[in-house]
Image (cartoon, rainbow, N blue to C red):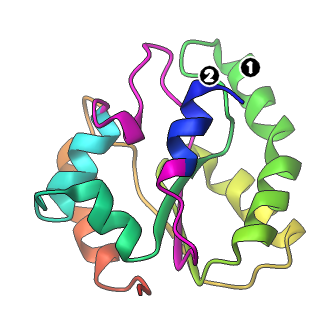
Amino acid sequence: MPEFERERRKFQPERVTTLFIGESPPHGGTFFYNEDSVLYRAMKEAFGHEEDFLAEFKAKGFFLDDLVHEPVNQLQDRFRNQMRLNAVCELAIRMAEYQPSAVVALMCAIEPMVSQAMCNANLSVPLYVTAFPGRYHRKRFIEEMSEIISKLPQL
């Protein structure tokens, strides 16, 4: 099991109420569950800068998985999109296992793949979508995520 996945599993709640889906771990080596990624910092801000953010995230039944479990953000668009499409079946299997009450796609471009995985998993729950908090969309992400958070089921 890759190091990213071992770290991710440490934070998997017993019951996943809300499943957040990112595109993939970043190519640069940072990772949400290592508390050093752009996504981690933006999520922590949107959630209100909780002191032990990951512990609180897990305690609410929140879990972040990725569509693709290897970095794709450095790939050309054609290959990146193919990797996303190829990952739908595996994501559907994981979704069927998690049985979340809501799903949040953390990048607009992955919404079709996340929707397809939900369909494949026979998962009929709300799907929320927000822009990824990269350079140009951080403010938009914080605003959208702040609105989404109030709608999410939690423990």
Q: Amino acid at mark 1?
A: Arg
Q: In the image, is residue 30 part of the stretch drawn in magenta?
A: yes
Pinpoint residue 57: horizontal percent, then vertical percent: 34, 65
Q: Amino acid at mark 2?
A: Val
Among the 4 quarters of the image, the one containing residue 94: bottom right
Pinpoint residue 106: horizontal percent, then vertical percent: 46, 52
Pinpoint residue 6: horizontal percent, then vertical percent: 59, 37
Query: Which residue is identified by label 1?
Result: 78
Give the secondary structure at mark 2. Answer: loop
- Judged left or right of residue 36, residue 86 is right
Pinpoint residue 1: horizontal percent, then vertical percent: 72, 30
Residue range of the region highlighted in magenta in the rendering: 10-37
Rendered position, 48 above or below 22? below
**Residue under the image location 43 percent in, 13 percent down:** 28
The crowding category of the residue bearing disc 1, from other C-alpha atoms within 10 Å (few below 14, some 14 to 19, many at least 20), is few
Rendered position, 154 above or below 93? below
The reply to whether residue 142 is visible in this rendering is: no
- Judged left or right of residue 54, residue 52 is left
Secondary structure predominantly adopted by residues drawn in magenta: loop
**Residue under the image location 60 percent in, 22 percent down:** 71
Among the 4 quarters of the image, the one containing residue 60: bottom left
**Residue under the image location 83 percent in, 71 percent down:** 119
Query: Which residue is identified by label 2?
Result: 72
